[in-house]
Amino acid sequence: MTTKTTAAAAANATNAANTQAQAQQATQQTAPPLPQEIAGEVLIEKYAKGNETNVSEVRQRVARALAAVENEDKRAYWEKQFHEVQEHGFVPAGRINSAAGTDLCATLINCFVQPVGDSISETSDGRPGIYTALQQAAETMRRGGGVGYDFSSIRPVGAHVKGTQSRASGPVSYMRVFDRSCETVESAGSRRGAQMGVLRCDHPDIEEFIHAKDKGDLTNFNISIGVTDEFMRAVEADGEVELTHKAKPSADFLAAGAYQREEEPAETNAANAKAAPKKDASGDGSAGLWVYRKIKARELWDQIMRSTYDHAEPGILFLDRMNRDNNLYYCETIEATNPCAEQPLPPYGCCCLGSINLTLFVDAPFSEQAAFDYAAFGKAVDVSVRMLDNVLDATHWPLPQQHAEAQAKRRIGLGFTGLGDALIMLRLRYDTTEARAMAAKISEFMRDRAYLASVDLAKERGAFPLFNADLYLSGGNFASRLPAEIKEQIRKHGIRNSHLLSIAPTGTISLAFADNASNGIEPPFSWTYTRKKRMADGTHKEYAVEDYAWRYYRHLGGNVDAALPEYFVTALEISAQAHKDMVAAVAPYIDTSISKTVNVPEDYPYTEFEDLYMAAWKAGLKGLATYRPNSVLGAVLSVSDSKGGDASPAKGAASGAHPQDVVISDANRRLSIGTLPAPVLASLRWPGRPRLTDGNAAWTYMIETPHGEFALFVGHIDNGKKVPFEVWVNGSEQPRGLGAVAKTLSMDMRANDRGWLKLKLDMLAKTIGDESFSMPFPPHGEPKLMPGVVSAMAQAVRYRCEQLGAFEGNDPTPVIDTMFSRDEPRTGTDGTLSWTVDIVNPAANEEFVLGLKEITLPDGVTRPYSVWLSGNYPRALDGLTKLLSLDMRVMDPAWIGMKLRKLVDYPEPLGDFMAFVPGTRRQQNWPSTVAYIARLIIHRYAMLGILDESGYPTREMGILETPQKKGGAKVMQGALCGECGNYTVIRKDGCDFCSACGAVGSCG
């Protein structure tokens, strides 16, 4: 070998090494961050079994369980493949991850549809009787499955019951029975079951159904209306619709004009299509439907829309579209869906679900070279289809009917999750045409690859038993629109699964297995939020929960504290129309349906909201669900009284009930309050001082007292009208503690509640000091007798506020509206317990007792409601305690916490002293008596579990709108959270989500 050749070889080796090193460096630079702590916590809590401690071990268990149905000689191979595909993006549904390979006799299927007939116990039109269906549903939920029902077969209120010569009570009454059963039956030992109730738009009880949940009933149901094309056309044309049923009406309905149609084509009413014989199963009349009454279609539509706008329910299912698109239109009728609505299903049909995490297939994320790796994605689709087909053979079946239905059709539902984050990583903004085109391209690729994978399975295992190539590939259904080459393969070899695709909400599996990638088809809801979790020992632990793409961007050096690139966009920053358009872009490539919640802001116009549903129907969607946070959704906080009566706020007010009216039998008593108002979330403004770059004007007045004088200042801002926003005092002769009163009062000025400010000033004006004195009072200096210095200051401030018109008008009073008691609750002769603590400040020669009077709220929580001092202390502090006592009665403890935190650093000249840190035997220096009082009150709140030792609430109520980090989740009004106790559970990405503590509940 020559020297030249050797040198060339060495150079080539060096270049190769450099290239390899650069590649490794590039890989390291773009490698995703390690999973966040909350992901591991959720995994252990919900999915890990036995000694499993990490996600790989859970995946290994699932892989082993699903490979067990393979031929013995191939099990090891497929177990490895199944584990690898999970490590590289496939996320089986929650029931699979939770139960596969365990000793639990639980189903791996997330949900089913349960038929319900029009009979108490007998089979009617092929459907089981109501109580038979109830028993079957209970068994399904006990094994871990959610259940959807169509209740349209049940005869309406007032229908004639021939056997008992009575009137029917209607489907809603029986839904309550199913609701209570679901509440009682624990699902697979860990959770309550999920339920979907459906009623057709032409059922005579449709109006009762629309409003069934308005007053808090049917809490274990999602409800949706099955809407027909005929009805939607009537809405467009302002026509009438007939409300019909096969059951004969009672005499009063007949007298009111109910009549029987002469003919009834079976296809016009799917709920009654099986009543083709001239006599129905109960012998109650001919096959022609009875028209109970007629109603204007637009009037009914407006009821549906208004209820959905105010209550987020009912959802809408476009039944005709579902059935036209159904691959098995020739052998089944779709009447209902699973609880999340991503699977329209026949009776006893099932959801066998899994999702592929799209974020793992983005190469060079956030760069101009960002691209989607279709080759790797295709391999994941292939193996995922096989895994889900195996689930149908590996699972326990709650009912034999469900097993038979699954074996005959072998439905599965492969989808994706992380679409929103994947689009961000591809530098595509979710609400743009380019993003919708990319989502459609990914969906089309997934469709084609999944159908071909199922064909390959059919070659190996055979087609599903009800496969008929001519019917399956024709009739305008989904399969008839497949590419010609795929249809040719299906016709030649058959297909293993009747349906293959579904985009489901991924809930906690996205958090546990995908490091909080965006959920399903949804964009990210927020970039960050805080999960406040109650631990086993009763303490709380906080976790930062961060969106995967946002976190990855920061990991790669992106500045998340600055303005994010424009392609970073959250759900509430996107128009409702854009949400709908994304579903419309993806839907043509999904053979079942898509679970999608369109989150709209509270102020979203009703007319645009209504148009959203009409546009969804015209776009060919199969359904739509929306969520608009609003005050109607916030349940009234109340408890029943001791006699079991109604303790709603309205009735409590009417009866003149007061806290002291409650009788408590034990000797160690506290006052108890029976009802609370339901204030609007974020109704209280954070009273921070505005930043005024050009300064502000202030009114000054000299307060003259027997012990000297000092200056009082009332600052105001001028935004077309002068508005007072702060108070302060200055001068060496001001009484000790008066500055703290001014500081607290300033925050009240900025609370945007004129009534609250006047209440505070009126209270202070009555405060009696060490001695009364006469003071020249504005505007002309007439002498006025003042009961004390605090009163003098308050009256002067009130005068200035009246000058500025601060109390004029009938504006809302948001702070007053959130008080659980405006007046201080008074004790009876038996008294009440107080918490007291001794305070000694040697530097100021002060020694006194601090006391807090406490009350028990309806939820059992004890809250301070009044503070008092007794002993030798600065009398100006009586004004401070009056202010803080009012603050304590604001329902959201964040309010009093904020006030106290503002005082813990309050200094006074020569007023600092050493004292014990509350709750410890350690001493520290405190800047003033006021600061120590504030810290002691915080400590008492911490002892009661209301605030932490830093003065922050242990649970967010969301009434006080606190400053949010950019991209943080906002607390929203909703249902009761079983974990933190706030009425802040909303629908996010198709799942229950507590916007206060971050708990993720059921999806469906």
Image (cartoon, rainbow, N blue to C red):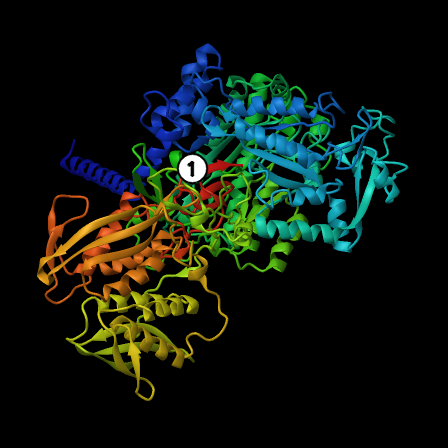
Please name the residue shown 67% across and 37% down the image.
Answer: 172
Q: Is residue 531 left or right of residue 811?
A: left
**Is residue 762 shown left or right of residue 301?**
left
What kind of residue is marked 1?
Answer: Ser
Query: What residue is at 64 percent from the left and 49 percent from the top?
Result: 616
Q: Position of residue 956 (x, y in %)?
A: 37, 49
Label 1 neighbourhood size at 10 Å, few (<14), some (14-19), many (20+)?
many
Expressed as whole percent of the image width and height from the top left, the position of residue 624 reads: 60, 45
Q: Residue furthest front?
A: 829
Q: Disc count in the image?
A: 1
- Look at the numbered disc 1 and give the secondary structure of its residue: helix
The answer to which image quadrant residue 667 occupies is: top left
- Determine the residue located farthest toward the right in the rendered image: 262
Looking at the image, is 840 positioned above or below residue 753?
above
Provide residue 758's location: percent of width, then percent of height: 39, 70
Figure quadrant of residue 728: bottom left
Relative to the observer, which residue lies in front, 295 or 877?
877
Mark 1, residue position: 510
Using the rendered image of the protein, determine whether residue 923 is visible from the camera's viewpoint: yes
Q: Which quarter of the rendering shows the C terminus?
A: top right
